[in-house]
Amino acid sequence: MNRQRVEELIRELLIELGEDPQREGLLHTPARVAKAYEFLSSGYRSDPKEVINKAVFKSEANNMIIARDIEVYSLCEHHMLPFYGRCHIGYIAHTQVLGVSKLARIVDCYSRRLQIQERLTAQIAQEIMGAVDAEGVGVVIECRHLCMMMRGVEKQNSVMTTSSVLGSFHSEPETRAEFLNLIRR
């Protein structure tokens, strides 16, 4: 990302909005916004394979592994407004497991892009499925969308829930039910 160019664009935007980018409170705003967008879009410069960074370990267990309440922060691709919430991940390994922190890093890698929640959910599930050749994967994301809260329909208490279930989580109702029951605790 060309931070200097983004700063110029933010200065132009401030002018278009009717502001004076030279006034005291806005003097450093273009630089701060550019830095914020660099962070919020860092997923474009992250390779999920590098994020996992060989943190795949052999395991004899083939039980369900769950990480709940992973914080999610992203930007809606339609309005570039934040959406935020929680991600729950479950998978059943064949012979390999991921280091637990890598689950959160995969979430960050895909959420730090302009997104829609439906695609984000699927991308996380597919990445985990491929990383450890899992028997099955389930991902549920629950988020509040500022584009619904601050503008448009202005619904303050709405929460969007999406799920992606692959492998045994898709084909075996008992496995899917166990996952959904465990993330509700």
Image: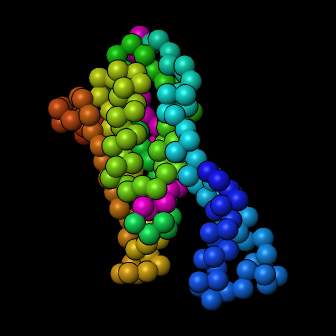
Residue 176, placed above or below residue 13: above
Residue 15, placed above or below residue 101: below
Instruction: Please tell me in which quadrant of the rendered image residue 79 appears.
Output: bottom left
Query: Going 58% across and 47% down the picture, which residue do you hit?
Result: 42
In percent of width and height, residue 80 lies at 48, 66
The residue nearer to you, when weighing 122 against 11, is: 11
Asked if residue 72 lies in the magenta stretch, the reply is yes
Secondary structure mostly seen in the magenta stretch? strand
Query: Going 26% across and 34% down the picture, which residue do you hit?
Result: 166
Residue 140 appears in the figure: no
Asked if residue 144 lies in the magenta stretch, the reply is no
Give, as a single range, the part of the protein colored magenta.
60-77
The residue nearer to you, when weighing 87 against 1, is: 1
In percent of width and height, residue 98 lies at 49, 24
Residue 77, placed above or below residue 180: below
In percent of width and height, residue 106 lies at 49, 37
In percent of width and height, residue 92 lies at 34, 25
- View extreme (bottom): residue: 18
